[in-house]
Amino acid sequence: MAGSPRPARRRPAVTTAQTPRKKLTTSAMIASFADPGQRTSPAPFGHALNRLAEERPEIVGLSADLAKYTDMHVFRDAHPDRFFQMGMAEQAMLGAAAGMAEAGLVPFASTYSVFATRRAYDFLCLDIAEPGLNVNVVGALPGLTTGYGPSHQATEDLAILRACPNLTIVDLCDSVDIDQAVPALADHPGPTYLRLLRGKVPTVLDEYGYRFELGKAAELRGGKDVLFVSTGLMTMRALQAAARLEADHIDAAVLHVPTIKPLDTETILAQLRTDRLVVTCENHTVIGGLSEAVAATAAYGRTGSRIVAAALPDEFLAAGALPTLHDRYGLSTDALCARVKAEL
């Protein structure tokens, strides 16, 4: 894992006079999924948390040796006395965050999604969710947002966490979503899990009059032929696909679902009660995420909707460049357009 800011576990580097160590200038770990020339905002989570902390002294931040790579460094630099570096010990970090919440603080605990879910699940479940504490777990690199392969690709985090009682789960689209969601998560009395988009995050939703509301889905555009039900970065791709499909006289609507749990079943059911093709879009495995939640909502609501899933396959994914991987696994805008045309 040369070039990774956080390998699964550190190993001593081996260098010799005959094999000099190369200086790496880019990293698949922190690669951006933004399109070339797209408007972006730097570290929106870090700046939103910093602004909130200026108003609320009970806000604290924790990191498991990854402040720079979860945008927590913005908060750390502004509020060093309220930042806690826990080292490579995710379980201990969540346990400490639970104790801080018991004492009246409002912690935001950040690490990579794979470590927050696979490695520290028991602490999240029993120390935080079971007592219903106001701890906000921030998971960076959700789904396929790194090219570093299965050890760092959190493709199944929603499936792991949706079954955890008391836990609110959000998967945000862009910098606008993040900026508005951070104070809402702090205000929420129970625990939350945020799938964090970090670094230079696209700015998209300001063009649609959007306002984040915890627990609510939002229709961003209407359309009579196709309904995209999307979450996370895939809402950006769904909007791009809907715009491109206009050239083929295909009218596509986009329903953004930023809160995965509790799911806004009322709005989703209202949108499903048409004869449109429904395409669920998520940066997550097809198992246990948004697509299955929407399908269950349709089944329980007896809508009879035809639903197809644009999601990651039920397998360990390859390593590589993000644009190549998104094309390969069906998350690119081109792939979404092709999927719709094939299904109509």
Image (tube, rainbow, N blue to C red):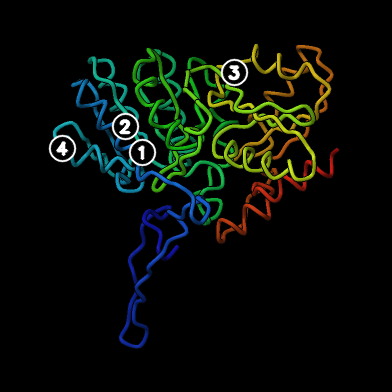
**Left/right of residue 304 with respect to residue 147 in the rendered view:** right
**Left/right of residue 340 with respect to residue 28 in the rendered view:** right
Which tag, 2 or 3, sits closer to the chain's start?
2
Q: Position of residue 187 (x, y in %)?
A: 35, 15
Name which residue type carries label 3: Leu
User: Can you see residue 127?
Assistant: no
Q: Residue at x 64, y 15 (%)?
A: 267
Q: Kindly report the distance in space between the C-alpha atoms of the residues bearing marks 1 and 2.
A: 6 Å
Q: Residues within 10 Å of mark 1 (few under 14, many from 20)?
A: many
Which of the 4 image quadrants contains residue 73? top left
Residue beneath label 1, please?
44
Front residue (pair 159, 28): 28
Q: Residues within 10 Å of mark 4 (few under 14, many from 20)?
A: some
Residue beneath label 3, please?
263
Residue beneath label 4, please?
80
Q: Position of residue 323 (x, y in %)?
A: 59, 57
